[in-house]
Image (tube, rainbow, N blue to C red):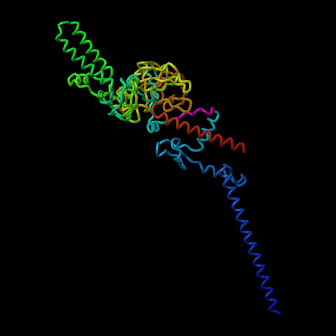
Amino acid sequence: MSEHIFNRLKGRVRVGLRSRSRVWVAGAVLLGLIASAFVLFVVVSSLRNQPVFSAANGGSGAESDASEVTYSCPMHPSVVSKGPGACPICGMTLVSGEEKGAEGHGSHGNHEHELPVVSLNSAQRVMANVATTKAELRNFSTETISLGKVSWDERRLTRVSARIAGRVERLHVNFTGARVAAGQRLLDIYSPELVSAQKEYLLAVEGAEQAKENPAPESREMMEGLREASRSRLKLWGMTDGQIRDLTRTRRPKTVVTIFSPVSGVVTERSVTAGQYVNEGTPLFSLASLTSLWVEAELYENQLADVTTGAPAVVTSDAYPGRPFTGKVTFVDPMLNPETRTLKARIELVNPGGLLKPEMFVRAAIHGRSVRALAVPEEAVVVTGDRALVWIETASGVFEPRPVTVGRGGDGFREVLSGLRGGESVAVSGGFLIDSESRLKAAQSGAAAEHEHGGKGR
């Protein structure tokens, strides 16, 4: 009996222990969730720049903000220090976060496109390699840069056609792209009419020789006239002077006559095959010379005033870096392309060694007339998007941005139409570094102002 009671009590104790274990596990899970929520709250609050604890905690939030002031380089934002000093890269004085906030508060009222003034000491100026020059009236030749494409000189295209009906017996040049020299054999042709014409010429030659013994001058003149007429017909039908001399010497007509290339160039088209019958006027070959080519340069409307016929031009190609090809503008298209709003300027140039090939893309620099205008070096103009600006040195080491309207360029200078006066000092080298510094300040100022206004709003 007592053993039975003891077993029942033992079972109840086991059940109680199991229940307590479940309660402990549940409590541990609950405490973990509470701790995770607290950590998440702290992280979110710090990211939103809000103090985690209230002011009732003895102002610990303000002390934390003061202790986290950092110093960074305006030119190299990656350089960050917990104390003041100089940038190890460029030597510029590190700026604290409080100074950035003050600058941002002062410049927040400016227009969003305005850039702040940049001040450089002598060391920073040397490190940034900043040099200045004065804007003044200059004489310079305008230069128009455009893209173009190489094409054949249309005046140097030659079409070789059949001068008499016959059958092509053999092709000596049988593929497109082959280079041929003047006087080189192109094909052999058999023509019965040409054979008959050679026989007639030989008869005229014999008659002229026999007429020399005739005392009547009229007979001699008539036979010589027949001989020259027969000779002219042979030349019209494609025989050369050398072939006619050989015919006169051998007194044997040739059944096959060779047709030679009239010019040196490249075969751009082959229109005949061996064994083909051709008629008078049938195209045989198309030849083009590579000694002189055209470059068709595309010009926009605002470039037309600076490009005139006869202007010198320099053509460069990526295929031959560092090797310029000189030429001149020989024709400007009188009509504008309505789709591209451009027109073509034709540049004629000599092609030594046949280096340039038709259909190649090239760049053309066309030199225009000499002008006198207020100008600054090309390096002084900083183009940002749809506007251009220069950096004016208003005081020693103090640079102020000035939007300008630029015009024509050439000889390394750019015409300034408005926004600048003669005698003002502009930054030539280092302008982009100054611009980057100013934009960095503007971005930092905008971020500080946004943080301040955002904190007040909350």
Left or right of residue 357, residue 96 in this image:
right
Q: Is residue 125 left or right of residue 196?
A: right
Q: Is residue 263 visible?
A: no
Residue at x 18%, y 9% (from the top left corner): 214
Seen in the image, is 253 located left or right of residue 61?
left
- From the top left corner, tell me how far across and down residue 52 is, in percent: 69, 53
**Quarter of image, res 233:** top left
Q: Nearer the viewer, residue 343 or 108?
A: 343
- The answer to whether residue 131 is magenta is no
Q: Which image quadrant for residue 156?
A: top left
| Residue 131 visible in this rendered orientation of the protein | yes
**Which residue is at the front of the view, 343 or 195?**
195
Q: Position of residue 257 (x, y in %)?
A: 30, 27
Q: Residue at x 71, y 63 (%)?
A: 33
Query: Toward the viewer: 172 or 355?
Result: 172
> Does the segment drawn in magenta span residue 111?
yes
Q: Quadrant of the C terminus?
A: top right
Magenta-colored segment: predominant secondary structure:
loop
Q: Is residue 458 above or below residue 425?
A: below
Count all numbered tags in the image, as a single digit.
0
Give the vertical position of 402 relative to 226 (above or below): below
Residue 402 appears at what percent x and percent y?
Answer: 54, 28
* Quadrant showing the N terminus: bottom right
Which one is nearer the viewer's eye here, 269 or 304?
269
Q: Which residues are magenta?
A: 110-119
Establish if 83 lies above or below 201.
below
Q: Position of residue 106 (x, y in %)?
A: 62, 36
For this orientation, the residue located farthest to the right is 1
